[in-house]
Each structure stands twice: as structure tokens, then as C-alpha cells.
Image (spheres, rainbow, N blue to C red):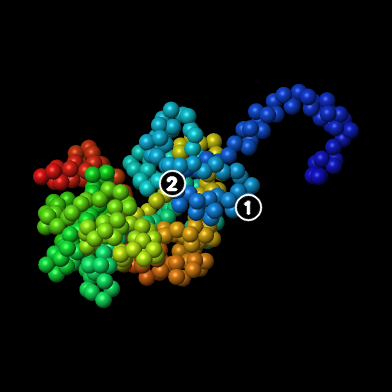
């Protein structure tokens, strides 16, 4: 019992008792408003299972804030909710919105004062954005069929060698850019000799000229993350770009696929807070908690994404760390996608991504 309660005067106590009936009539609505959960939105499946276990459940226990987790995250729905003023979400995990030119219209600024200093100091620079804070990182890697390229046989270690069909023969696969993913364009530039730190601004003419050299060897431009592993295991292709988590899972299962980190692309995903949420403070608390070294370590001990918090590796099994995109010895071999470039508006009035998609569709059809 609080000191305030124990010191109630007799008059105050009588007033409280006398007012109880009137208060009770309004209490349900008030209590419902006070106990409305924080609505957190992200992916489903194995990620949802891991995230609830590693972050949501301990956050609820430690902070006493109820969380409702839902999926999938959808940028279009977020925009509709903000535009209509009918917000249903409080915190959303997405790759692009924090870096779009209109981010201030749809998103709250991240309150880094809600984060402890150790967390902020240990976050990778790519994590700390004005309208988003990094959640996790995944990689698009170069992968191989172990039937065609067993471990004792030379494999390409650069995209220039991936493009070299004489030295490394066999059908290939690369990701389609039709949905706006630019990874293949960046790999094409690396194949043409552009250094990792000189990729941006993207030279589309040079990239498509490079793609002309490999187009005939590409069996399929994949669109679904499961496709590369399936094609490699079925021996439809000898090598492909692929998501690291998919390939590591197949490798652990003994499937005929392997990969490496050389010249892989790191893709960040961010927590964003919809503009106008009434749970802004709680959303910032959750984002700060999810960014902590301990929370990220719990998550990344369960799933093959890379933490943004460098201190997380103090709590991650070294054998698991070796298979994570941001793991020591892995991150240095790769490059981060420059989302700001792809979301920027070009002289044509379209974003660079929109320009890419239009050109890609014409190139594929030619």
C-alpha cells in the first residue's frame, strides 16, 4: 500500500466510497484505454516465432507493457492509416520508409533519448536514421551447387568471376529487378570492375551493359527467396545469388548448396513509428529494447539475420556468429545497399528505383 493510501483522511475516504458507484460507470472505458496493447507489426512464420520468444515476451515481462504482434508489415497500409487518421499500428518493421523523401509525413522521429547510451554507441552507423532505427540485416550472397562446384573445386570469389562463363561454366540465376530490388544491378557493376565503395551513384548504362554479357547464361531471374536454393539442389543452375538465411538452412540440412560472403550485399531493415500514434512513448521503449545487445543476441541465436548492435556478439554463440551477415570477419567482405540513393527522386521526377524498374522490364523483354 502506498504512502498516499495509508494517509487518507477520514473525509477523503468517505468521499472515495461515496464516489465509487459513479466512477465505476466510466471505469471500463478508461481501463480499456489504459490497457490497450502496443501493436507491433513485422513478418510471420519462423521469424515471428523467434521474435516473440527473443524480444516480445521478455519485453512484456520486464517492462509490463502488453504487446500485440501482427503480420505482415505493409508500407501501403501504414500510409493509408496515417492519411486517414485511423492508426491501428504503433511500430512497424520495414526496409524503406525511413529513408523515403516523404518520411516526415508518415513517420515519427526516432527518440534516441529513450535508448541507453551503450546501445546507441554500439549500433552500426547504418542503423541510426532520423525516422527509423535498424532492426536486423540480411545478405544477398553468391551461392553454388555443390554437385557442380564441390568444396575441392575452384569457385568464383567475385562477381567478375561469376560473370566469367569460360572459367566457370554452367547456367546461372540472378534476382529480378522487376519488383524494385536493385541487387543484381549492383552485382553487375562489381562484375564490370567498379569497387564496392564506388558503386553510388549508380551508373545504369554501365550496369546494363554488364548484364548484356551474362543474360544468355541466366536460366531464370528469380523473384521468390526459396527459388535459388531449389534450383541449386535440383541442379537446374550451377550458381546463383541468394538470401544467406535460406542457403544456410539448406546447408545445415545437407542439401547440395553452399555460399560465401565475398561481395555480398547487406540489406538493412528498420523499425518505424507511424506518425500520430498515441503509443509513441511505448513504441520508442520497444524499439530501444529491441536494439539492445541482449535482445538482438537472443534473436540472432535463433535465426540467420545479423544484429545491428555490435555488442550483441558478446552473447552470440561463435559458431552461430560465423553464419550471420554482420558477424566478425563477414561484414568487412560485403557492402551496404544505399537505400537513400534508390529512394531519391531523379531528374525525371521518378525515384531511382522506379527508373530502374522501367528500364529492367524493357531490357528483359528485349
Task: Name the one closer to the observer, 355 or 60.
Answer: 60
Residue 153 occupies which quadrant of the picture? bottom left
Q: Residues within 10 Å of mark 2 (few under 14, many from 20)?
A: some
Q: Residue at x 29, y 52 (%)?
A: 227
Residue 38 occupies which quadrant of the picture? top right
Q: Residue at x 50, y 47 (%)?
A: 111
What element does badge 2 sit on? loop
Q: Note whether residue 281 is visible.
A: no
Find residue 296 and name its label: none
Left or right: 43 in relation to 115: left
Q: Note whether residue 226 is visible.
A: yes
Q: Quadrant of the N terminus?
A: top right
Residue marked by disc 1: 62
Q: Quadrant of the C terminus?
A: top left
Contact check, label 2 and label 1, Cβ < 8 Å: no
Q: Residue furthest right?
A: 10
Residue 66 occupies which quadrant of the picture? top right
Q: Position of residue 167 (x, y in %)?
A: 14, 69
Q: Residue at x 74, y 27 (%)?
A: 24
Left or right: 150 in relation to 126: left
Q: Is residue 349 above or below residue 126?
A: above
Give the foreground label among 2 and 1.
2
Find residue 43 and name its label: 2
Q: Position of residue 300 (x, y in %)?
A: 47, 60
Q: Residues within 10 Å of mark 1 (few under 14, many from 20)?
A: few
The answer to which of marks 2 and 1 sits earlier in the sequence is: 2
Q: Position of residue 288 (x, y in %)?
A: 52, 52
Left or right: 138 in relation to 231: right
Q: Residue at x 35, y 38 (%)?
A: 102
Q: Is residue 337 above or below residue 160?
A: above
Q: Position of residue 229 (x, y in %)?
A: 30, 57
Task: Name the one closer to the observer, 359 or 126.
Answer: 359
Amino acid at each position: 500500500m502506498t504512502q498516499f493510501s495509508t494517509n487518507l483522511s477520514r473525509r477523503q475516504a468517505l468521499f472515495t466510497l461515496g464516489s465509487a458507484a459513479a466512477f465505476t460507470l466510466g471505469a471500463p472505458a478508461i481501463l480499456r484505454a489504459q490497457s490497450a496493447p502496443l501493436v507491433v507489426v513485422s513478418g510471420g512464420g519462423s521469424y515471428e516465432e523467434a521474435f516473440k520468444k527473443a524480444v516480445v515476451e521478455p519485453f512484456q515481462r520486464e517492462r509490463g507493457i502488453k504487446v500485440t504482434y501482427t503480420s505482415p508489415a505493409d508500407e501501403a497500409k501504414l500510409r493509408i492509416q496515417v492519411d486517414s487518421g485511423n492508426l491501428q499500428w504503433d511500430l512497424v518493421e520495414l526496409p524503406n520508409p525511413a529513408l523515403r523523401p516523404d518520411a516526415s509525413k508518415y513517420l515519427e522521429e526516432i527518440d534516441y533519448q529513450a535508448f541507453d547510451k551503450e546501445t546507441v554507441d554500439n549500433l552500426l552507423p547504418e542503423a541510426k536514421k532520423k525516422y527509423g532505427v535498424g532492426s536486423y540485416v540480411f545478405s544477398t550472397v553468391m551461392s553454388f551447387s555443390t554437385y557442380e562446384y564441390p568444396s575441392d573445386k575452384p569457385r568464383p570469389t567475385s562477381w567478375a568471376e561469376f560473370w566469367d562463363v569460360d572459367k566457370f561454366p554452367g547456367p546461372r540465376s540472378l534476382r529480378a529487378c522487376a519488383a524494385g530490388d536493385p541487387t543484381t544491378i549492383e552485382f553487375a557493376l562489381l562484375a564490370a570492375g567498379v569497387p564496392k565503395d564506388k558503386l553510388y551513384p549508380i551508373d545504369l548504362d554501365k550496369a546494363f551493359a554488364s548484364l548484356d554479357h551474362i543474360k544468355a547464361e541466366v536460366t531464370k531471374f528469380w523473384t521468390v527467396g526459396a527459388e535459388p536454393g531449389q534450383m541449386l539442389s535440383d541442379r537446374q543452375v550451377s550458381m546463383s545469388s541468394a538470401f544467406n538465411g535460406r542457403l544456410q538452412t539448406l546447408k545445415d540440412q545437407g542439401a547440395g548448396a553452399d555460399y560465401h560472403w565475398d561481395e555480398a550485399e547487406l540489406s538493412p531493415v528498420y523499425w518505424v513509428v507511424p506518425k500520430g500514434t498515441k503509443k509513441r512513448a511505448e513504441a520508442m521503449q520497444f524499439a530501444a529494447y529491441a536494439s539492445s545487445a541482449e535482445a538482438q543476441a537472443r534473436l540472432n541465436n535463433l535465426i540467420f539475420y545479423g544484429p545491428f548492435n555490435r555488442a550483441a556478439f558478446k552473447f552470440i554463440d561463435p559458431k552461430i556468429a560465423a553464419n550471420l551477415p554482420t558477424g566478425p570477419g563477414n561484414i568487412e567482405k560485403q557492402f551496404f545497399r544505399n537505400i537513400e540513393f534508390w529512394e531519391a527522386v531523379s531528374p525525371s521526377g521518378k525515384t531511382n528505383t522506379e527508373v530502374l524498374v522501367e528500364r529492367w522490364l524493357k531490357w528483359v523483354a528485349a
